[in-house]
Amino acid sequence: MSYDAKFRVWRGDADGGELVDYTVEVNEGEVVLDIIHRLQATQSGDLAVRWNCKAGKCGSCSAEVNGIPRLMCMTRMSTFTETETVTVTPMRAFPVIRDLVTDVSFNYEKARQIPAFAPPEGVAPGDYRMQQVDVERSQEFRKCIECFLCQNTCHVVRDHEDNKEAFAGPRFLIRAAELDMHPLDARDDRADFARDEQGIGMCNITKCCTEVCPEHIKITDNAIIPMKERVVGRRYDPLVWLGNKISRR
Ligand code: SF4
Ligand code: F3S
Ligand code: FES
């Protein structure tokens, strides 16, 4: 069964733009990305959109659909009524390059700042041994597809461009937490890094990041809150305090 849907798509570039109205065919089983592709093929050949897998696995097709940050390839048209206007806009927290494509390089800068996995001394690659039970906690975070929807949603940076310098965002707080929970990572300063370099204190646990994660990673409860507890524990643990005092002498 087909019908004609009303679509409103943001068109423009870094200098500005506007919402443009389209009427476009929708067929049973289609997703928002199918409709954007049909617009490209039939009405607007220069409409810019980033995508790769159309299977919810590459994290490229992030946008805002009726104001909600989502993957376009995983948003079924059956979510909307046939008479509803579907508005598609680029992610708001990142600078627009063109139409639905944003410049997400902020995220790559934050990724580069995280100290890499450090294996224990004397263990060669290929000789690492871990038990499943030891990796279970952090395995959840490996599901991240780097769609950056959580980064786009977090109010700390969404409406405050000037916070971007000091705040890494939820995706990279889970990366630090993942390494912190890794049974073979030899670095002992992930919590300090989260506090001093990633600005974990700026997160006030609103959990909006968790709500939009297409991989259903419990970003706040399983990564950010345990890391916050480690940060606080370090600061107030009398043994840590004493250790720091002694090592500073
Ligand atoms: Fe996307 Fe979830 Fe990864 Fe954030 S944590 S980048 S929302 S997959
Ligand atoms: Fe932002 Fe998620 Fe914290 S939305 S404020 S990082 S809980
Ligand atoms: Fe890959 Fe949507 S196209 S996640």
Image (tube, grey):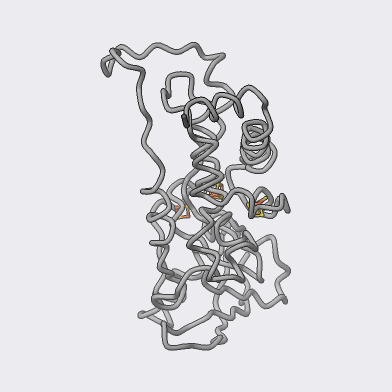
- Residue 179 placement (x, y as % from top left): 47, 31
- Give me the residue at 67% from left, 78% from top: 85
Q: Quadrant of the N terminus?
A: bottom right
- Residue 121 placement (x, y as % from top left): 32, 16
Of 103 and 205, which appears nearest the observer? 205
Q: Is residue 248 above or below residue 50?
A: above
In the visual, does 176 lie left or right of 234? left
Q: Is residue 95 above or below residue 114?
A: below
Q: Quadrant of residue 103?
A: bottom left
Q: Residue furthest front?
A: 249
- Give me the residue at 55% from left, 57% from top: 151
Of 99 and 234, which appears nearest the observer? 234
- Residue 79 placement (x, y as % from top left): 69, 61
Of 41 and 62, which appears nearest the observer? 62
- Total number of numbered discs in the rendering: 0
Of 10 and 246, which appears nearest the observer? 246
- Give me the residue at 66% from left, 70% from top: 67
